Amino acid sequence: MSRQVNIVVAGDGSEIHDEPHIRDRRITMRYIHVLVEERGLDAQTVAERFDLTAAAVYHALAYYHDHPEEMRAVEEARRERHDAAADDPRIVTGPEDLPDS
């Protein structure tokens, strides 16, 4: 009999990330969703790219769809941080924000 290991860590229970992600990794459920369902990558391709099993990718997608309110809250928090960064010149969001050397 096989046993299922919970591969998802909730953001509030994590020391490495503030949103649900794959245990011991910084790969979020939202990012897996973007790669597979928005960019159209095959789950096996995503698994190989990040040294995961296909099952881990499907678990991440299942978590994403089983927790829609949590995932909406994650996306809203990301939007708020992005907007705050756009209004604060001290926050570096990309290479164009770095001072010339």
Image (cartoon, rainbow, N blue to C red):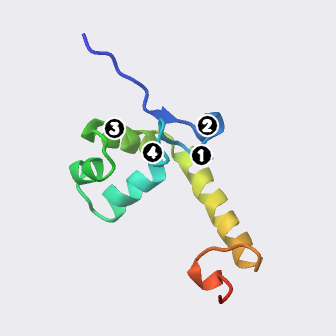
Above or below — where is 75 with respect to 92? above
Q: Amino acid at mark 2?
A: Ser
Above or below — where is 42 with respect to 38? above
Q: Amino acid at mark 4?
A: Tyr
For discs 4 and 1, the disc positioned in front in the rendered view: 1
Assign the C terminus to one quadrant of the image.
bottom right
For discs 1 and 3, the disc positioned in front in the rendered view: 1
Q: Are marks 1 and 3 in contact (CB under 8 Å)?
A: no
How far across and how far down the image is residue 89, in percent? 76, 80
> Residue shown at 60%/43% (left/top)?
16
Q: Which residue is mark 2?
A: 14
Q: Amino acid at mark 3?
A: Ala
Q: Are marks 3 and 4 in contact (CB under 8 Å)?
A: no
Q: Which residue is mark 4?
A: 64
Q: CA distance from mark 1 to mark 3?
A: 18 Å
Q: Are marks 1 and 2 in contact (CB under 8 Å)?
A: yes
Q: Which residue is mark 3?
A: 56
Q: Which residue is mark 1?
A: 17
Q: Is residue 99 left or right of residue 21?
A: right
Question: Along the line of sight, which residue is nearer the eye, 65 or 19?
Answer: 19
Q: Is residue 7 left or right of residue 98?
A: left
